[in-house]
Amino acid sequence: MVHALWRQFPRINLKLTALEPYLLKAVNLSNQPIHHKITQLLKSGGKFLRPGFFYIYSEFGEKIDPAKVKAGAAAVELLHVATLIHDDVIDESPLRRGVETIQVKYGQKHAIYAGDYLFTCYFTQVLKSTQEPADMKRHVDAMQIILAGELDQMQYNFNQKMTEADYFQEITGKTAELFKLCFQQSAIITHASDEIVELGGEIGLTIGQAYQILDDILDYSGSSKQTKKPVLEDLKSGVYTLPLIFANQLDHQDLKPLLDKREQLSDEDIAKIQKIVISSGGLEKAIQTADSLTDKALGLINQLPEQKAKHDLEKLTKMLLTRKQ
Amino acid sequence: MVHALWRQFPRINLKLTALEPYLLKAVNLSNQPIHHKITQLLKSGGKFLRPGFFYIYSEFGEKIDPAKVKAGAAAVELLHVATLIHDDVIDESPLRRGVETIQVKYGQKHAIYAGDYLFTCYFTQVLKSTQEPADMKRHVDAMQIILAGELDQMQYNFNQKMTEADYFQEITGKTAELFKLCFQQSAIITHASDEIVELGGEIGLTIGQAYQILDDILDYSGSSKQTKKPVLEDLKSGVYTLPLIFANQLDHQDLKPLLDKREQLSDEDIAKIQKIVISSGGLEKAIQTADSLTDKALGLINQLPEQKAKHDLEKLTKMLLTRKQ
């Protein structure tokens, strides 16, 4: 079942509904338990945001080969799910999309290889979507930025001097680069003009950044009902996100003694930090940053030629990037 | 420092010596500690067997572009090292090539991403070695067989009914497929004839199988001086290799009660199993299997056109596949 979000976009909903069985067929392991877990994860209600954007943006192309677009859309989702599987091993997450993670059910051994295996499924689909070496290189470079980003970000753990620029570099690798790839690659394989390709890259990057900042804002502002990822875990492992970075610039004196405790933060400390992030104006400043990125994305989308896809993209962007705080 | 093994092959030694700094440059992370660990691993005296075979076999080509051959040789070593890093996480190995593993020094989080990152370095080099979509597909397919192989093999853990055919499927994925890829791809990018390409695939596959069987034989026959990998660990995690599979066919009655203990095997049980593997003739039969594969590989090599590389390949194969039992 494709996520309810797409009901408002019937054309894309139809394509994503057809993509699901295609994705399942792209995975072909004789190890049945693992095969089952991977396909379960692919079916279990992810938002399909990346293939969704891929499909929408493909409509700006000039020569659309549906089989290639489908392979391209499948590729970006497979890459996304591969990184999710490894993220879950790393974070020791018990659940993903409401289902038991692979490492909980079968051990991390299976989860690591399952992620690796999905990387190869990703490349198989890339090769079905394009035969251009330059496109291949774009995919590999993006994957490299994503993974180097994960490694580079760990350097910043517990670094109280982490700046806004460091944070942007981090989320670009972690989230925005893959959105950029979706838009760019979708335009390229449908033979869109150079302007559309370039504009797509910028739109994807901006949406990806705003999306990640909003996610990080939710950690500090959301009720536990809205967010499933406890801010506590991130803070204890030294991951400092934009609201905290801003708060630390605005009220370092109050935050320093708390952050100095590093892994030793108590629940009470976490509650104090959350309070300071709000009272210092750090959270508000992060919200403003996200809002201005959303405006930027909408401005870029506005430069696209007049057609149905343009309005879909605008509507979807507004739906995603103006979540209730 | 390239492994001493290559001193007997001065031409290849020279190329591998030049490959080392090239490999180090292929890794480019701003995360300095991880960058350092990966480059340390690349320099730390691995045998460079895969790039070595790649270089030797490239000499049967008809149009050799040294930069492309170098990239191809680098690619197969990077893929090998990427899988080693993930294997070490999975096996919780403290040391690799005598150096502390990444997960011991920095945690498994870093090791998982470091392996993933190396997969992308591998593809970057593949793209430098060839621009043919068919070659790309061959690489991706091989990588898929390797990883699916790792997952599929786990199904056989503790399976006393595992057959010789199951074992061969397992080691083909785990080891032989990458050797096959080295030979095939080396021939293809140097525009060798179709016969050379096909013969290369068979030679690589056969050498890879014999190499893995010999490694598994050492677990049962070697003194602890010769082998660093304790047979105990493999047996306790339910990995049954050829000597045991044969022994189990020849003397199931004695082995069954021991194997039924699964993870609970004591050191004494392990010693008993080793004894039965030898007394039943299982070990001997595995040695014969390896020997006949070695003969097969040498027979295939003999079909190659007369030139220096042919004799080097023969000599190297003999050196590798007739280890002291």
Image (tube, coloured by chain):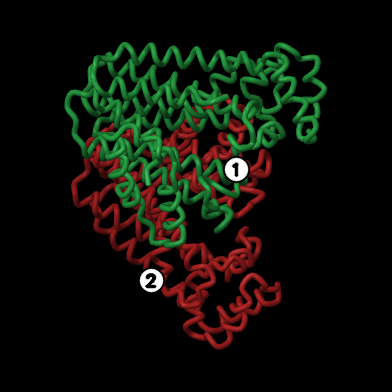
Chain colours: A red, B green
Number of numbered labels in the structure image: 2
Which residue is denoted by mark 1 in the rendering? B90
User: Of circles 2 and 1, which is in front?
Assistant: 1
The quarter of the displayed image where residue A64 is located? top left
Q: Which mark is residue A165?
A: 2
**Residue closer to the observer: B34 or A315:** B34
Residue B79 is situated, as x and y percent measured from the top left of the image, at 42, 39
At x 42%, y 36%, the residue is A15
Q: Residue furthest right?
A: B257
The quarter of the displayed image where residue B32 is located? bottom left
At x 48%, y 85%, the residue is A250
Left or right: A246 with respect to B271?
left
- In the image, is residue B74 above or below residue A36? below
Q: Residue furthest left?
A: B63
- In the image, is residue B105 above or below residue B216? below
- Quick one: SS at disc 2? helix
Residue B291 is situated, as x and y percent measured from the top left of the image, at 51, 15
The quarter of the displayed image where residue B300 is located? top left
**Residue closer to the observer: B203 or A50:** B203
- Quick one: SS at disc 1? helix
Rate crowding at label 1 as few (under 14), some (14 to 19) or many (20 or more) other CA atoms within 10 Å: some
Rate crowding at label 2 as few (under 14), some (14 to 19) or many (20 or more) other CA atoms within 10 Å: few
Q: Which mark is residue A313?
A: none
Regarding residue B244, the answer to whether it shows in the image is yes
Left or right: A118 with respect to A231?
left
**Residue closer to the observer: A56 or B155:** B155
